[in-house]
Image (cartoon, rainbow, N blue to C red):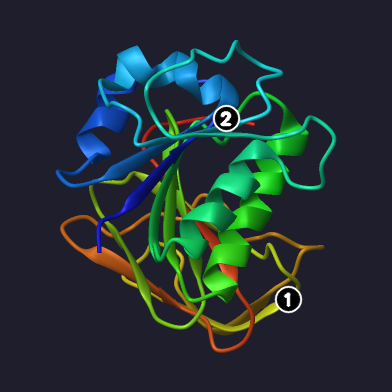
């Protein structure tokens, strides 16, 4: 089945980077304020979802789900649930990080929720790409200068990292002590990350960003 691309209303400065991640056959869902990114992405909507509190309903001849403003789900979460209902199991999320911190954290939770349901999900922004490591190994090629591992859903145990500047063997990373920040794949190779128990948020970082 095709991949579902969900476009949120968060900031996007490097449209070329996002366009490079799109694939032929992708189906694109714009969420409310995400519609402002349509021209920059050059991707027509297959579905529009939103309560239109961030932008005006454009009234396009495209299937549109108009949501009430008072609801439990954000527009992005609703769009993901609708996509799951329609059978999608692979997702690319863009415009979902940056801007409001509460929405950013909510969308980290969305990555966790999709992983819990057995869906494959990748989120990208201007600096990085993010995914959940749980059931199988994940990899970081040396084209990425840095990567970080964050315990986003409780303790992660049995964390093993090979092919990196700072390897780990059967380690534990907890939400209270996030020491897996700013690791580096070894030159000419790729790092491999696995976790025996729990889940990690893997963040591949494209360029330096100093906190």
Between 106 and 33, the one lying in front of the other is 33
Q: Quadrant of residue 165?
A: bottom left
Q: Residue 16: x and y, percent?
A: 25, 22
Between 59 and 205, the one lying in front of the other is 59
Q: Which residue is mark 2?
A: 210
Q: Is residue 104 above or below residue 197?
A: above
Disc 2 or disc 1, which is closer to the eye? 1
Q: Residue 18: x and y, percent?
A: 31, 31
Task: Please report whichever mark, 2 or 1, sits nearer to the chain's N-terminal start.
Answer: 1
Between 114 and 75, the one lying in front of the other is 75
Seen in the image, is 117 located left or right of residue 127? right
Secondary structure category for the residue under label 2: loop
Q: In the image, which disc is placed on residue 155?
A: 1
Secondary structure category for the residue under label 1: loop
Seen in the image, is 42 located left or right of residue 153? left
Q: Residue 131: x and y, percent?
A: 47, 58
Q: Is residue 145 above or below residue 136?
A: above
Between 178 and 23, the one lying in front of the other is 23
Q: Residue at x 81, y 47 (%)?
A: 72
Q: Residue at x 74, y 33 (%)?
A: 101
Q: Residue 185: x and y, percent?
A: 33, 58
For disc 2, the neighbor class at 10 Å (few under 14, some 14 to 19, many from 20) is: few
């Amino acid at each position: 089945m095709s991949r579902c691309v969900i476009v949120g209303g968060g900031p996007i400065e490097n449209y070329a980077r996002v366009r490079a991640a799109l694939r032929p056959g992708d189906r694109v869902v714009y969420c409310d304020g995400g519609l402002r990114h349509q021209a920059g992405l050059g991707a027509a909507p297959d579905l529009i979802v939103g309560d239109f509190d961030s932008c005006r309903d454009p009234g396009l001849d495209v299937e549109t789900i108009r949501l009430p403003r008072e609801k439990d789900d954000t527009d992005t979460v609703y769009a993901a649930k609708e996509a799951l209902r329609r059978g999608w199991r692979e997702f690319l999320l863009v415009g979902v990080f940056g801007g409001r911190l509460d929405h950013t954290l909510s969308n980290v939770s969305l990555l966790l929720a999709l992983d819990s349901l057995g869906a494959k999900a990748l989120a990208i922004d201007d600096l990085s790409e993010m995914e959940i490591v749980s059931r199988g190994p994940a990899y970081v090629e040396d084209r990425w200068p840095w990567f970080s591992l964050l315990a986003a859903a409780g303790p992660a145990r049995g964390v093993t990292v090979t092919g990196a500047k700072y390897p780990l063997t059967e380690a534990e990373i907890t939400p209270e002590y996030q020491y897996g920040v700013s690791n580096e794949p070894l030159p000419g190779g790729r790092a491999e990350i696995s976790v025996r128990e729990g889940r990690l948020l893997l963040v591949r970082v494209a360029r330096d960003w100093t906190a």
